[in-house]
Amino acid sequence: MSNSIRVSAHNPAIELAEPPSAVRECTRCQAPPFNQFSRLDLNTESGDLTVASICVRLDLEDLTCFSVVERQYESWGVLFQNAIAIRPSNPAFSPQAGLMLLLGAPESGCIEATFLRPVQYVSSFIISSRRTVMSAFNRHNQLIGQTESQANSRWGRCLNQRLSLSGSNIHKVTLCSFNGELTIDEFCFCAA
């Protein structure tokens, strides 16, 4: 059974907790939805434990409302550009979990995340009234993967949708909603 580590912007303390058995699991790693978790593999020949994968899920709840989010999660391996922490009052933009979201601002509709070490999986819930594209780039800023959400404006409401990408050596992702507002929640990334 794996342990979890809470990833918080303001609280550097580490809490270890046994994951409850009844919680939903991460769709990629089949690991509990904690803020950081790792899978350990036992080498049967040497008896050594090695970290097989490390996943980080960001806890936005400790952020100050309307603060610019850039380096708050640097110690966990990610930097943001064009992101502001908000607690939405519009019920159409309700978070998947908790109360806080990241809003693409001051440039409307885009958020960029740069990883200090390459990752192989990135996931986030997005809320936008327009089609949103998640793009992944390698260290040379070359596009290596892309996925997009459904456009919701014709239904007159915004839906909380998960976007995710897998690939080797992802150094940066951008989330862009064209001519619309964009918020993200439950931002998660995994390295092998």
Image: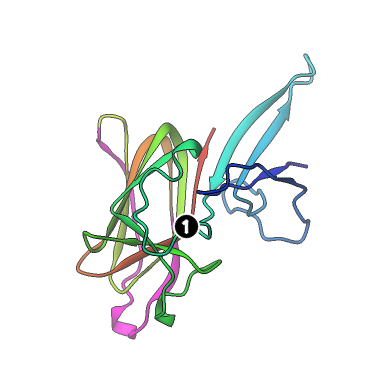
Residue 56 point in image, percent of width and height: 55, 44
Instruction: Check disc 1 and report its element: helix, strand or loop.
Output: loop
Quarter-of-image position of residue 119: top left
Residue 124 point in image, percent of width and height: 45, 56
Residue at the image position 45 percent from the left and 47 percent from the top:
122
- Work out whether 53 lies above or below 101: above
Residue at the image position 64 percent from the left and 38 percent from the top:
38
Q: Tell which of 142 and 51 is nearer to you.
A: 51
Image quarter where the N terminus lies is top right
Mark 1, residue position: 63
Q: Is residue 29 left or right of residue 144?
A: right
User: Residue furthest toward the bottom?
Assistant: 156
Image quarter where the C terminus lies is top right
Does residue 143 belong to the magenta stretch? Answer: yes
The region drawn magenta spans 141-163
User: Are there few (<14), some (14-19), or many (20+) residues within 10 Å of tag 1?
Assistant: many
- Work out whether 49 lies above or below 83: above
- Work out whether 95 lies above or below 75: below
Q: Is residue 34 left or right of residue 116?
A: right
Residue 90 point in image, percent of width and height: 39, 81
Q: Tell which of 81 and 92 is nearer to you.
A: 81
Does residue 89 belong to the magenta stretch? Answer: no
Quarter-of-image position of residue 25: bottom right
Residue at the image position 21 percent from the left and 59 percent from the top:
107
Q: Is residue 47 left or right of residue 123?
A: right
